[in-house]
Amino acid sequence: MLSQKTKDTLLGPLNINNPVVVQVLGICSALAVTVQLKPALVMGIAVTIIVAMANVIVSLIRNTIPMRIRIIIQLVVVAALVTLVSEILKAFAYDVAMQLSVYLGLIITNCILMGRLEAFAMTNNAWDSLLDGLGNGLGYAIILVIVAFFRELLGSGALLGYQIIPDSWYAAGYENCGMMMMPAMALILVGCIIWAHRSLNKEEK
Amino acid sequence: MKLNTNSNVYTIVYATIVVIIVAVLLALVSQVLSPRQAANVKLDQQKQMLVALNQELGADPAALYESLVRDTIDKENAKPGIFRFEVDGATKYVLRLHGAGLWGGIGGYIALDEDKNTIFGINFNHESETPGLGALIVEEPFRSQFIGKHIRNAENEIVSVVVLKKGNQAENGEDQVDAVSGATITSTGVSDMLKANLCDEYKEFLDEGMKELTNEGKEEDHVESED
């Protein structure tokens, strides 16, 4: 159903060309929102939507953008979108908006957005840009979720806020790993994922 | 004729148009949505007060709020925010709290019994505390510690409740609760917020009722001595 190129554009970023573990973009926010699974999920979804929309808009106006101020125009598009989404959420989904409060602003500074706009949307048509945006957003979300899964499980003994490690374990002397709460552990986990990812994909390189 | 997209004039005109379009769009959206947002903020505050009053929110929190609230001194969402409620026939006072956490502002609502001493319930909110650490102040296990604590000492002076690391003892014998482990600065922020708000900001209100009570007491004493 999908052509090979379309497939590569959409699914490539999920694995072979993942924005976090291969392109190493968007690491800062990966540290900030991965203490628990829920904010990581929400952040992943928000980035996916915004990077896809920004990609489409920039792709549509790419031929009119003056080269010298293209980064500024891209930034204006992203910032406007983020503000728009945050205003709409505050009006129609207040609880979600409160949960996202800081992270929404963080999206503007996410390198993945600028990276994709500059590297892809400026030179490709709107449809491909949409797929590229979705693919990269999801690729980012997957890594966030994997990191958050381990950090919440080992750090708080819970997943999505529900306790997973039974009380009997704690009674037997099991303790949550406080290290997992530290931002540094996110980097180490991302490092481990990059390691595993590179070893698995050796042949394809 | 093809436009020269690299000329100075084009660049300036383009930038101007983009900025105007974005500005108008955002201003418009903000105008259209602001009543809804304001309503959401208000509803959220009412919900927070209901949580502080240990109420089940149910399907219609706004109606529940209206059925319980009796009197408010609320200056545009700033301090002071004093609300009088009637829960199960008893008067409860709810005070709005403001303070600073680790990354940003923290706030909340404290519900006091009619004696303006015993904590009936409490609720916290925060702008940007760390999820899983400082953000745990909004969770039930931390909040429920406050229930039944007293904000006055034996001499009836307002001393607030202190948040201390587990195992520590309050210096001046105030009532204390355990801090969130791993979130020292946020916990201290909660402690400081309570102290600043109760001992200072709301002192007048909290002592007002007390004076009345002591006056009544004196009158009774007076009557007794006349006898």
Image (cartoon, grey):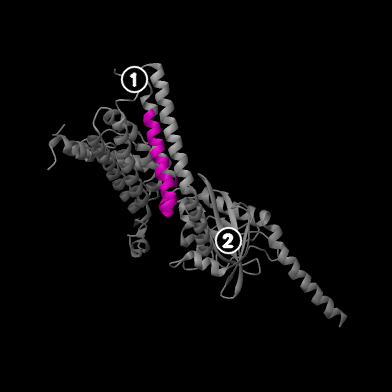
Give whichever of discs 1 and 2 has the lower sequence position: 1
Q: Are marks 1 and 2 on the same chain?
A: yes
Span shown in magenta: A73-101
Q: Residue at x 25, y 34 (%)?
A: A126
Q: Quadrant of residue A7?
A: top left
Q: Which residue is mark 2?
A: B110
* Looking at the image, residue A160 lies above or below residue B88: above
Q: Residue at x 83, y 79 (%)?
A: B223
Q: Does B44 sit left or right of A135 as displayed? A: right
Depth order, front residue of A196/A131:
A131
Query: Is A80 contained in the magenta span?
Result: yes
Q: Does B99 sit left or right of A54 as displayed? A: right
Instruction: Residue B166: tell me if it is visible.
Output: no
Depth order, front residue of B74/B111:
B74
Q: Which residue is mark 1?
A: B5
Label 2 resides on the chain identified as B
Query: Is A82 contained in the magenta span?
Result: yes
